[in-house]
Image (tube, rainbow, N blue to C red):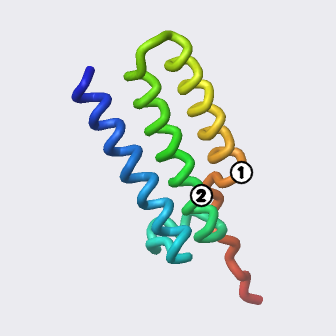
Amino acid sequence: MVGTAFLGGLIGLALLGFGARILVSGHAPAVIARSFRADREAGWYHLLFGVALVIFVVGARLPGEASGTTATILSIALVAVAVVRFRPRGRVRDEEP
């Protein structure tokens, strides 16, 4: 369980860092940018998923039942915001006549 939690935490930190880098630089890699309407949306999407994963992993490792439940509910809320508000939709293409 510790190995899986550690790996989940690392993936969460990687997503968090990747999203923060996109938001700070204002540019997403082309492969990612094609899936989102704006680079800013790609940054927030990855950042929120990373934060949610880190909170989930840390909350699962904290003692007490309430901390794990609270972390899970908070993680689900962050993922819901990411999926509803910043989900990948593709860029709007300019149509040529």
Q: Which residue is depicted at the point 61% across and 25% down? A: 73
Nearest to the eye among marks 1 and 2: give it.
2
Q: Which residue is depicted at the point 34% across and 36% down? A: 8
Which amino acid, by three-letter code, is at mark 2?
Trp
Could you say which disc has been placed on residue 85 in the image? Answer: 1
Answer with left or right where residue 23 lies relative to residue 89.
left
x and y percentages locating residue 14 in the rendered image: 37, 53
Answer with left or right where residue 35 lies relative to residue 4.
right
Report the residue that reaches farthest toward the bottom. 97
Query: In the rendered structure, are the residues bearing label 1 and label 2 in contact, judged by CB atoms less than 8 Å apart?
Result: yes
Pointer 1 or 2: first along the chain: 2
- What's the distance in space between the residues labelled 1 and 2, CA to CA? 9 Å
Q: Which residue is depicted at the point 49% across and 35% down? A: 55
Which amino acid, by three-letter code, is at mark 1?
Arg
Looking at the rendering, which quadrant does residue 72 occupy?
A: top right
Q: Residues within 10 Å of mark 2 (few under 14, many from 20)?
A: many
Report the residue that reaches farthest toward the front. 63
Q: Which residue is depicted at the point 73% across and 82% down? A: 95
Could you say which disc has been placed on residue 44 in the image? Answer: 2
Q: Is residue 80 above or below residue 67?
A: below
x and y percentages locating residue 43 in the rendered image: 55, 62
Q: Quadrant of the N terminus?
A: top left
